[in-house]
Image (tube, grey):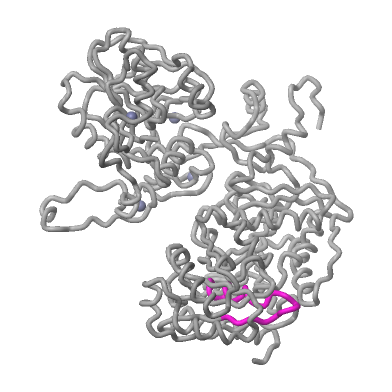
């Protein structure tokens, strides 16, 4: 096996605990794994941001500006550090699809830790790309992540084509009209999956639609808290 | 060629744009109807981008056949799951369901320039000999020639006659070099030397240039987008990373040249493999043993420094270095210090600054800087050293080649470390004594036990000096 990121060969360590049953092959070498920064310690209960406060200032702002927040909470796994930025650039923008394999076990663990106790009928919905963007990229990164989770995954959202989010300022992003269309309303709780949580606008637009059409509870699971 | 008045495109322009390229559909900036028309009239021809060869895949853009450098993608374009190449992904993804396209329409006629060279300088007699050998190789369409020129021989100038010869005969030329830094540095020099010729530079950060000039300057990686394009390819630093270690690059340069063409290899430190080819007379070569200023290469001194590993582990300079730095023959020379790792380059800097300021070697701590490959200020720091704003520069092997400072002494901390192989040591030693005003310089290998590489590097420098006619 070679590390998915640096290509160095991964030599499985044999210890007393795995002597008779070898561990599953790891997607990245220890040195690369060490450079990934998992979020930990005190975090905002709403958005996963690392902070001393129970609810961070961003989320206070959401609370003050929306009658009801359609999103129960968002849970993110990683900080957007240097290595993560490089991985995302190569994965999403260069199109090296296989790199999502790096995140599989981390997402499975996050699901176990934060979502497995929620209702069993919970359904995973990836944040979609517009048709144009999907054609350009060849794959939807959110869907690749969603499919790692041990529960039903369904594509019920569509995205209208529009300008790139990243070109807008925070206020512009928050004020924009809802870019999504809900194809099939759903009456089971939903986990929305996306790669990066930045302002939370994208997840909340999707959550709004779902909630208004009868979805009982919407959660977010994102790879990175930007 | 009969001009097609009704065509929605200009064939001549298209031929200049696409002849000699090997591109993915997304790299061809044409509307679908025009693109389809070119395909159906056989002006463009497609080929598979990934082929299966005895149970193995091969990427047709980069030649990759390594199993772990292919992966599967559930593709939203064709709605199948198939392989793509991870090896050349930085240049845009090559997927099994996509084709590569190349031009099979009328070939462009490149200009015959009567007097393309505007360079006013003079070649030394040794340089002229090499330059004329290059001209002959191009004129006689010899397939390969290796130019082995010592560090500081002035190899760029030696190419001017050959480039002139090629331009006079309407040939297309590419000068490929491993690093974008060097492409950026060479472009203005070539533009000055060939002021009437269209020249373009291509590297990872050069934006969407078309790569359509008669004289191209490119990083070796950019050759991955060419096929059957050049009459003359000059490959700089063939012994260096990445050309030396990445089989994609010889694969690409081999494809980028025309069937009848000349490839010129440049090196100051040929590898065993090339020396062996020379010895067996399988590769013609010309050796340039003398620097352009006519002085011999500085011969490095090995300095045993007890406790070197321990000192460096504690981010302290080797004790022997601190002794030497106070008794340098020419204390006005700037000092270039090579270290084996980025971490050490960063950690040793503050300690060294304090010690050298105390010793009176440095006027202020700011006069000492460190630089490495992932340093965002890399370019400006190198520039500051070049302008003598910085007196001492600590660096990793990124400055081992391609850069010239007029008057420096060179020290290597832990010269026995694996990163310093024979070629690296010879190149590093070659940083000293580059200027005719200060053609010497001290080169010191601080070590805690001499290595094969150190001994061979010194032998090799001595033997080059001997071949250059210097007795000692
Ligand atoms: Zn790795
Ligand atoms: Zn929050
Ligand atoms: Zn490839
Ligand atoms: Zn496909």
- Left or right: B141 in relation to B359: right
Residue most extreme to the right? B114
Q: Can you see residue A48?
A: yes
**A86 or B119, which is in the foreground?**
A86
B249, above or below A47, in the image: below
- Left or right: A75 in relation to B419: left
Q: Can you see residue A146?
A: no
**B390 or B362, which is in the foreground?**
B362
**B432 or A63, which is in the foreground?**
A63
Q: Is residue B116 magenta?
A: no
Q: Bounds of the magenta span? A: B423-443
The N terminus of chain B lies in quadrant: top right
The image quadrant of residue B468 is bottom right
Q: Is residue B427 magenta?
A: yes
Q: Position of residue B188 (x, y in %)?
A: 75, 54
The image quadrant of residue A220 is top left
Majority secondary structure of magenta residues: loop
User: Residue at horizontal 75%, vertical 22%?
Assistant: B7
B300, above or below B62, in the image: below
User: Residue at horizontal 41%, vertical 50%?
Assistant: B66
């Amino acid at each position: 096996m070679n590390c998915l990121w640096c290509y160095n060969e991964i030599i499985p360590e044999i210890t007393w605990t795995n002597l008779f049953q070898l561990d599953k092959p790891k997607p990245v070498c220890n040195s690369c794994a060490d450079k990934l920064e998992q979020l930990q310690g005190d975090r905002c209960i709403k958005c996963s941001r690392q902070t001393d406060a129970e609810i961070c200032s961003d989320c206070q702002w959401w609370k003050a500006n929306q009658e009801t927040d359609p999103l129960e909470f968002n849970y993110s796994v990683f900080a957007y550090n240097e290595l993560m930025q490089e991985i995302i650039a190569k994965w999403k923008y260069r199109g090296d699809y296989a790199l999502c394999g790096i995140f599989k076990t981390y997402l499975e663990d996050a699901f176990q830790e934060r979502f497995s106790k929620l209702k069993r009928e919970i359904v995973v919905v990836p944040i979609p790309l517009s048709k144009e963007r999907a054609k350009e990229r060849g794959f939807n990164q959110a869907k690749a992540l969603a499919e790692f989770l041990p529960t039903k995954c369904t594509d019920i959202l569509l995205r209208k084509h529009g300008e790139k989010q990243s070109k807008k300022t925070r206020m512009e992003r928050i004020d924009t009209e809802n870019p999504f269309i809900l194809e099939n309303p759903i009456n089971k709780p939903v986990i929305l999956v996306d790669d990066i949580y930045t302002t939370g606008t994208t997840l909340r637009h999707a959550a709004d639609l779902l909630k208004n059409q009868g979805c009982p509870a919407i959660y977010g699971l994102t790879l990175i808290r930007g | 060629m009969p001009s097609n008045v009704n065509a929605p495109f200009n064939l001549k322009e298209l031929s200049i744009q696409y002849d000699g390229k090997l591109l993915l559909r997304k790299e061809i900036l044409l509307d679908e109807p025009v693109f389809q028309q070119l395909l159906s009239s056989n002006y463009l021809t497609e080929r598979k981008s990934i082929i299966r060869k005895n149970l193995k895949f091969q990427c047709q853009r980069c030649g990759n056949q390594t199993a772990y450098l292919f992966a599967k993608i559930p593709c939203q374009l064709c709605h199948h799951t198939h392989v793509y190449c991870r090896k050349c992904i930085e240049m845009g993804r090559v997927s099994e369901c996509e084709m590569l396209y190349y031009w099979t329409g009328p070939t462009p006629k490149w200009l015959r320039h009567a007097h393309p060279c505007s360079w006013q300088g003079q070649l030394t007699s040794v340089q002229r000999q090499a330059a004329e050998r290059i001209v002959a190789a191009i004129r006689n369409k010899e397939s390969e020639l290796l130019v082995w020129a010592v560090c500081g021989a002035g190899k760029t100038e030696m190419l001017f006659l050959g480039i002139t010869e090629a331009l006079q005969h309407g040939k297309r030329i590419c000068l490929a070099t491993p690093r974008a830094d060097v492409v950026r540095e060479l472009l203005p020099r070539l533009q000055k030397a060939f002021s009437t010729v269209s020249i373009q530079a291509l590297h990872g950060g050069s934006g969407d240039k078309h790569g359509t000039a008669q004289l191209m300057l490119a990083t070796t990686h950019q050759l991955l987008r060419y096929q059957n394009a050049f009459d003359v390819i000059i490959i700089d630093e063939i012994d260096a990373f990445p050309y030396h270690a990445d089989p994609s690059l010889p694969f690409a340069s081999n494809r980028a040249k025309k069937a009848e063409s000349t490839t010129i290899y440049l090196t100051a430190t040929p590898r065993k493999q090339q020396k062996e080819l020379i010895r067996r007379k399988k590769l013609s070569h010309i050796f340039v043993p003398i620097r352009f200023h006519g002085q011999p290469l500085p011969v490095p001194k090995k300095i045993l420094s007890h406790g070197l590993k321990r000192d460096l582990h504690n981010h302290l300079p080797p004790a022997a270095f601190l002794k030497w730095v106070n008794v340098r023959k020419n204390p006005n020379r700037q000092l270039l210090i090579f270290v084996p790792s980025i971490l050490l380059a960063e950690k040793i800097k503050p300690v060294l600054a304090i010690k050298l300021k105390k010793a009176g070697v440095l006027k202020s701590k700011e006069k000492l800087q460190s630089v490495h490959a992932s340093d965002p200020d890399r370019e400006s720091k190198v520039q500051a050293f070049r302008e003598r704003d910085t007196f001492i520069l600590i660096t990793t092997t990124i400055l081992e080649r391609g850069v010239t400072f007029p008057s420096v002494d060179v020290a290597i901390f832990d010269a026995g470390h694996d990163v310093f192989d024979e070629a690296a040591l010879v190149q590093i030693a070659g940083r000293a004594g580059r200027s005719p005003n200060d053609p010497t310089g001290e080169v010191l290998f601080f070590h805690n036990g001499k290595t094969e590489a150190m001994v061979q590097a010194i032998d090799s420098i001595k033997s080059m000096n001997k071949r250059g006619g210097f007795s000692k």
